[in-house]
Amino acid sequence: MTNNKTYFVANWKMHGSLNSVNSIKNVIKLSKKSKYKNAKIVYCPPYTLISHFVEKTKKTKIDIGAQNCHFKKKFGSFTGSVNANMIKNIGSKFVIIGHSEIRSIGDTNKSINLKIKSALKANLKVIFCFGETLKEKRSKKTNKVLNYQIKNGLTKIGNIKNIFFAYEPVWSIGTGIIPKINELDKQVRKIKQIIRKNYKVNNAKVLYGGSVNSQNIVTLKKISSINGFLIGGASLNSKNFIDIIKKTIN
Ligand code: PEP
């Protein structure tokens, strides 16, 4: 890991009820200890719980994010949708955009680009997800795919300072399989190189996501190019999430 802030983003996906809000109390306690001052924790619960998480975490350094947004920034007739301004309005600071589970039901590089633009306009920080499928990996297309997703997702976006890049190999999400450590390090460095070349930014934050848990974190944290983790399943249980943070920061 780098010596700067390490990001721990909890993606709760379609999990959580009102009772779950209280389950993060030990994470809040941990976040207040000076030993963990460099652990930047972001919870992304479902829309239904965002206000409750905002309330629960006020007066802490924990930030709250949404898991997606509509690309339109104004109110409109889009049943079932929530836009970036609405997310900002209820106290979220972040939004995840481009997650493979949403790409798989129709999100395209074009819609992702529009969503990122509207989220930045709403003053949200964006966790921009991208990653290759197993088929693409097996046919050695990873670099081409990542390059394409990053460039198209960021078309005509000049300022990327509020964008966090989340490399999430699709074949790793929810499978228990993580990339080989040296390959992951190489891939993250490549991603930083793409960002440097295209956006002239040297200090972009790149997170890794895909089956991070309290065992494999011991190995993953050794990868110095990574700035943090996007954590799905293992973030639902506070004890597991705390273990991950403690083992990374010790
Ligand atoms: C994710 O979906 O963003 C993710 C990283 O999931 P998991 O940790 O469960 O693989």
Image (spheres, rainbow, N blue to C red):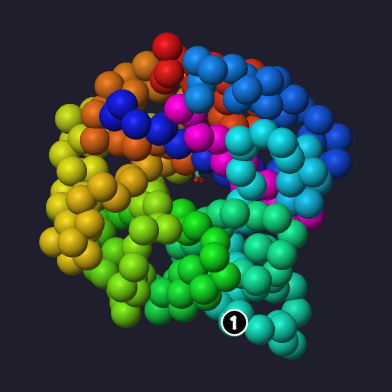
Using the rendered image of the protein, determine whether residue 10 is visible from the camera's viewpoint: no
Q: Residue 116: x, y in percent?
A: 46, 69
Q: Quadrant of residue 141?
A: bottom left
Q: Is residue 42 magenta?
A: yes
Q: Residue 153: x, y in percent?
A: 36, 70
Magenta highlight range: 38-48
* Lateral position of residue 127 relative to residue 83, left or right: left
Looking at the rendered structure, the number of numbered marks drawn on it comes to: 1
Q: Residue at x 52, y 73 (%)?
A: 121
Q: Amino acid at mark 1?
A: Lys
Q: Residue furthest bottom?
A: 77
Using the rendered image of the protein, determine whether residue 243 is visible from the camera's viewpoint: yes
Q: Residue at x 52, y 40 (%)?
A: 9
Q: Which residue is mark 1?
A: 72
Q: Residue at x 37, y 16 (%)?
A: 218
Instruction: Using the image as rendered, state which of residue 204 and residue 133 is in the foreground.
Output: 204
102 over 106 or under it: above or below: above
Q: Residue 108: x, y in percent?
A: 43, 74
Please tell me how crowded label 1 is: few (under 14), some (14-19), or many (20+) other residues with Cα within 10 Å.
some
Q: Secondary structure at mark 1?
A: loop
* Lateral position of residue 238 relative to residue 108, left or right: right
On the rendered image, what quadrant is the N terminus found in? Answer: top left
Q: Residue 47: x, y in percent?
A: 73, 57
218 over 10 or under it: above or below: above
